Image (cartoon, grey):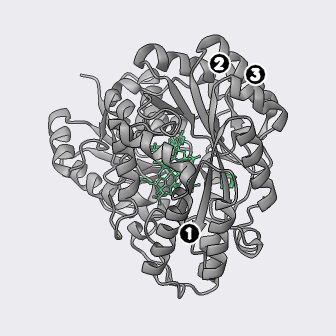
Amino acid sequence: MRPKIALVHPRFHYPSGDLPIGILGLAAFLRERLPVDVVLCDTTFRRDFGYVRRFLEEERPDLVGIGSSTLMIADAREVARLARSRNALVFLGGPHPTVDSRSVLAWPEVDAVVIGEGEASTLDLVEMLLSGQRRPVAGCLVRDSDGGVLEGPARPPLPDLDALPFPAWDLVDMPAYLRSWGQLGAWQPGLPGANLMASRGCPFHCAFCQPVLTRMFGPGQRVRSPDHVAREVETLHRLYGIRGFWLNDDTLTTRADWLATFADALGRRVPGIGWGCNTRGGLMPPDLLGDLARAGLKRVGVGLEAASDRIREGLYHKGVSVEDVRHTVETAHAAGIRTLVYVMLGAPGETWEEMHDTVRVVTSMPADEASFSLFVPLPGTAIHQEMLAQGWVLSDDPYDYDYYARQPFRSGADLSRLRLIQHVAYARFYGRPHHWPYLARCLASPSARSTLVDKLRRLGPRSLA
Ligand code: B12
Ligand code: SF4
C-alpha cells in the first residue's frame, strides 16, 4: 500500500471563499513528485473538531501536515494532538511555524516544522520521515529520536515558479468556495471566482509586515510568467466556470511590462473575465490603466494604513505618502476601476485625533471601498521586536493577534473605544449616499448577502466569527 499524507487547513474562524492556495499547491506538488496518496482536510465549511477526528479515523494517514497562520495556531495544535493520538507523524508549516519554529517544535505532538516556502522542503521531509531514519533536512527543524533538534541548512527559494503545478483544486469543496467568493462582489454580486498568486515575496520593508515575507519567500520578489498565470485562469474557467479572479499578491504592480503582457495573454485566453489585485500608492502605472481596464481589471486595493506621517512613516516605515495613495485612487477611479483602501487603527501611541483624521482623509478620496483593521504587531515583524524592546507587554494568546477585532497590547486606547472608532469609520465611509446602490446590489444577491454578513460578523463584539 502507498503511504498516505493528510494535509490539514484548520480554518475554524473567519471562513472565506478565498482558496487556501498555499496548501493546495503543496498537495499538488507532493502527489506529482512522490509515490504517495495525498488527502486534504479543510475545515473552512466544516468547522468542528469532530469532522477532523472522523476524517483522520477514516483516512488513517501515516503523516499529517498542518498549515497555520498565527490566528490558527491554537486550533492547529489541537489537530496535531488528534493526529498524534492516532499514531501519525506530525509536521507543521505556513507563516506562524515559520516565524516561531522552535516553540512549535517544542510541542510533544510535533515531529518537524517546515520553515518558509513549503514545496521542496516538505518533499525531502516526507521522504526522510517515511524512511524511519531521522536526519537534518534543508529548510526544516526535525525532532531527533532522542528528543534533540536537528536543524537543516536554510533552503534557497525555488528558482522557477512556472515549474510548480497548479493548486490541487480537486481536494476541496470547489462549489462551496465559488459560492462564497466575494472579491468582485462590489462589481457583480455573487460572481463565481477564485484567488491566485502570481508572485512570491515583496521588495518593500513595511515594519508591520516584514521581515515575515522575506523569511517565508526570501528577499525580493519572484514572479511567474504572465502566460503561466493566464493559463491557470483559463484552467479554472474551463473546469469550474469562474468569471472573476483576485491576485493575492502583495504588490504585483511593481512591473508595468509584466502587467501589460499579462493583460494581453488574458485577453487571448479568457476574454471578458473580471479581475482585481493589490498595489501600492504610486505604483499603478497611470498610462496602463486604460488597457488594464479593457483587459477586465475591475478592482485594486491600496494601503494607506494611517494618514499621520508620524504613524505611517515614523512607525510603520510604509514609504508611501498620502498623496501617492490619493493619486492611485483618483487615476484608477478615472479609468473606471473600483478602489479599496486599507487602513489600520490603533498603533501604539496613536491619538484619537490621528485616527479620526485617517478616517476623514480616506472619506475624502473617491474610493469605493475601505477596510478598517486594528493595528496588530504580528510575531516575527520588525514592529513586534521594536515594541518588545520598548517595554510593551504583548499577549501570549494567538487569538489576540486578530486585526479584524482585537489587539495583543494595551496602549491606553481602550479596546471598546477603538472598536467604536472602527464602527464609526465604516458608518462614515459607507453611509454616504453614493455607496447605497452597492449595498442594495449586495442585499439583492444571496451569495453576496452571505459574504456581507461574514464581513459584518467581524465587527461583532470581540467575536471570532
Ligand atoms: C490572501 C491572504 C489572506 C486571505 C486568504 C487566506 C487563505 N487563503 O486562507 C484572507 C483575507 C482570508 C486572510 C486572512 C488572514 N490573514 Co492573510 N494573507 C494572505 C496573503 C496576502 C496571501 C496568502 C497566499 O495565498 N500565499 C501564497 C502561498 C503560496 O503561500 P502560503 O499560503 O504561505 O503557503 C506556502 C508556505 O506557507 C507553506 N505552507 C502553507 N501551508 C502549509 C502546510 C504545511 C503542512 C507545510 C509543511 C507548509 C505549508 O508552503 C506554501 C507553498 O510554499 C498572505 C501574504 C503572503 N504573501 O503570503 C497573508 C498572510 C498569510 N496573512 C496574514 C494574517 C495575519 C492573516 C489573518 C490572521 C489576519 C487577521 N484576521 O488578523 C487572517 C487569518 C484568517 C484565518 N482564518 O486564520 C499574515 C500571516 C502572518 C502570521 N504570522 O500568521 C500574512 C503572511 C500577511 C502578513 N505579511 O502579515 N489572508
Ligand atoms: S505591507 Fe505590502 S508592500 Fe509592505 S512589505 Fe508587506 S507586502 Fe510589501
Rate crowding at label 3 as few (under 14), some (14 to 19) or many (20 or more) other CA atoms within 10 Å. Answer: some
Q: Nearer the viewer, residue 419 or 219?
A: 419
Separation of residues labelled 1 and 2 (CA atoms): 36 Å
Provide the secondary structure element on which disc 3 rests: helix
Mark found first going from the N terminus, 3 or 2: 3
Answer whether residue 72 is visible to the viewer in this image: no
Q: Nearer the viewer, residue 364 or 266?
A: 364
Q: Marks 1 and 2: CB-CB under 8 Å? A: no
Question: In the figure, is residue 451 to the left or right of 380?
Answer: left
Question: In the figure, is residue 233 to the left or right of 46?
Answer: right
Residue that carries the numbered disc 2 in the rendered image: 266
Rate crowding at label 2 as few (under 14), some (14 to 19) or many (20 or more) other CA atoms within 10 Å. Answer: many
Q: Residue 424: percent from the left, percent from the top?
A: 50, 69
Q: Residue at x 43, y 67 (%)?
A: 405
Q: Residue 11: percent from the left, percent from the top?
A: 34, 49
Q: Nearer the viewer, residue 17 or 220?
A: 17
Provide the secondary structure element on which disc 2 rests: helix
Which quadrant does the N terminus fall into?
top left
Answer whether residue 433 is visible to the viewer in this image: yes
Residue that carries the numbered disc 1 in the rendered image: 375
- Residue 2 lies, with reference to residue 103, above or below; the image says above
Q: Residue 269: percent from the left, percent from the top?
A: 61, 12
Q: Residue at x 68, y 65 (%)?
A: 207
Separation of residues labelled 3 and 2 (CA atoms): 9 Å
Q: Residue 453: percent from the left, percent from the top?
A: 35, 50
Amino acid beneath label 2? Leu
Residue that carries the numbered disc 3 in the rendered image: 261
Q: Residue furthest right?
A: 287
